[in-house]
Image (cartoon, rainbow, N blue to C red):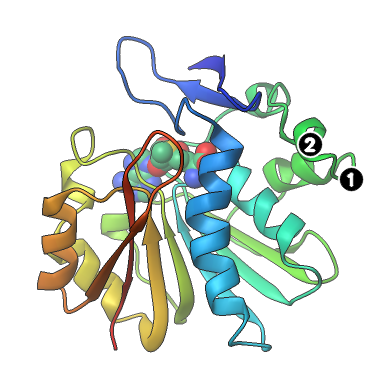
């Protein structure tokens, strides 16, 4: 894995010998804020003052979790994240997100050093549950209000963007829940529709025309 600086100054990781990156090279923080925070967290948070249950597909660098704490202003959040291939703590320590966001020193490393397979209180209002398993093999014990679908692209991971996988998520959502993803490809839109979702195409972050938000009702 190689560290890269994206256009907004924040880091991403790139996979050697592949064009795949963990985020948009036009701006990692900018993309995550646009897709997951603005179109996801802020959209559902307005309607739900109770503990918000978030599921993330692909913990990766931990950027989405950090942004969620940064933006949630005290709303109680239970954050489940799935990651079969975690990055090393040494690599996570090189990522510049705390500095870029000017957040409390040590918060980001707490996300990476917290234990797997158990609930961990990261702040008084944010509980993290990391699980080292593949999405296709996961069974969930509770339902979710919001899903950050942040897997590698359908070209790299075609088996994750299928009606079967979205049907698996469908059973753990309620009518008001939403899924947000950076990917707006036709096959993804169709797979979501085939799994029973209503899909909305929204303007994308810089460098992408569109993103998707899906819900059951
Ligand atoms: C596009 S990266 C994004 C990660 C993260 N959200 C971030 O901001 O850094 C996709 C992530 O999905 C993970 N992944 C790969 N295969 C997976 C699978 N079968 N199930 C769940 N996650 C997977 C990768 O290891 C990687 O961390």
Residue that mark 2 sits on: 98
Q: From where the camera sits, is residue 115 visible?
A: no
Q: Nearer the viewer, residue 32 or 136?
A: 32
Residue drawn at x 81%, y 72% is: 74
Total labels drawn: 2
The alpha-carbon separation of the residues under discs 2 and 1 comes to 7 Å
Q: Residues within 10 Å of mark 2 (few under 14, many from 20)?
A: some
Image location of residue 137, percent across then percent down: 29, 58
Residue 6 picture quarter? top right
Precedes in sequence: disc 2 or disc 1: 2
Q: Quadrant of ligand 1?
A: top left
Q: Position of residue 28 (x, y in %)?
A: 55, 34
Q: Is residue 96 above or below residue 107?
A: above
| The one of 6 and 3 positioned closer to us in this rendering | 6
Q: Which mark is residue 115?
A: none
Give the residue number, with chain letter if any, for mark 1: 104
Assess disc 1: are there few (<14), some (14-19) or many (≥20) residues with their C-alpha within 10 Å of its C-alpha. few
Image point 78% across, 59% down: which residue?
Answer: 122
Do residues under tags 2 and 1 come within 8 Å of each other at their CB atoms? yes
- Taking 125 as reference, is 22 above or below it? above
Against 89, residue 134 (above or below) is below
């Amino acid at each position: 894995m190689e560290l890269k600086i994206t256009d907004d100054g924040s880091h991403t990781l790139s996979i050697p010998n592949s064009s795949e990156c963990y985020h948009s090279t036009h701006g990692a923080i900018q993309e995550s804020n646009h897709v997951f925070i603005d179109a996801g967290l802020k959209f559902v948070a307005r309607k739900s003052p109770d503990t918000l249950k978030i599921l993330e597909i692909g913990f990766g660098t931990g950027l989405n979790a950090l942004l969620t704490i940064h933006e949630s202003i005290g709303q109680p959040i239970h954050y489940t994240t799935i990651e079969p291939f975690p990055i090393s703590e040494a690599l996570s320590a090189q990522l510049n997100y705390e500095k870029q966001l000017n957040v409390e020193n040590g918060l980001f490393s707490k996300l990476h050093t917290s234990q797997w397979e158990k609930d961990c209180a990261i702040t008084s209002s944010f509980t993290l549950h990391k699980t080292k398993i593949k999405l296709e093999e996961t069974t969930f014990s509770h339902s979710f209000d919001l899903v950050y679908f942040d897997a590698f692209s359908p070209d790299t991971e075609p088996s994750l963007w299928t009606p079967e996988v979205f049907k698996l998520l469908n059973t753990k959502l309620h009518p008001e829940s939403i899924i947000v993803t950076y990917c707006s490809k036709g096959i993804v839109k169709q797979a979501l529709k085939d799994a029973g979702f209503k899909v909305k195409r929204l303007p994308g972050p810089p460098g992408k025309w569109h993103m998707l938000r899906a819900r059951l009702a």
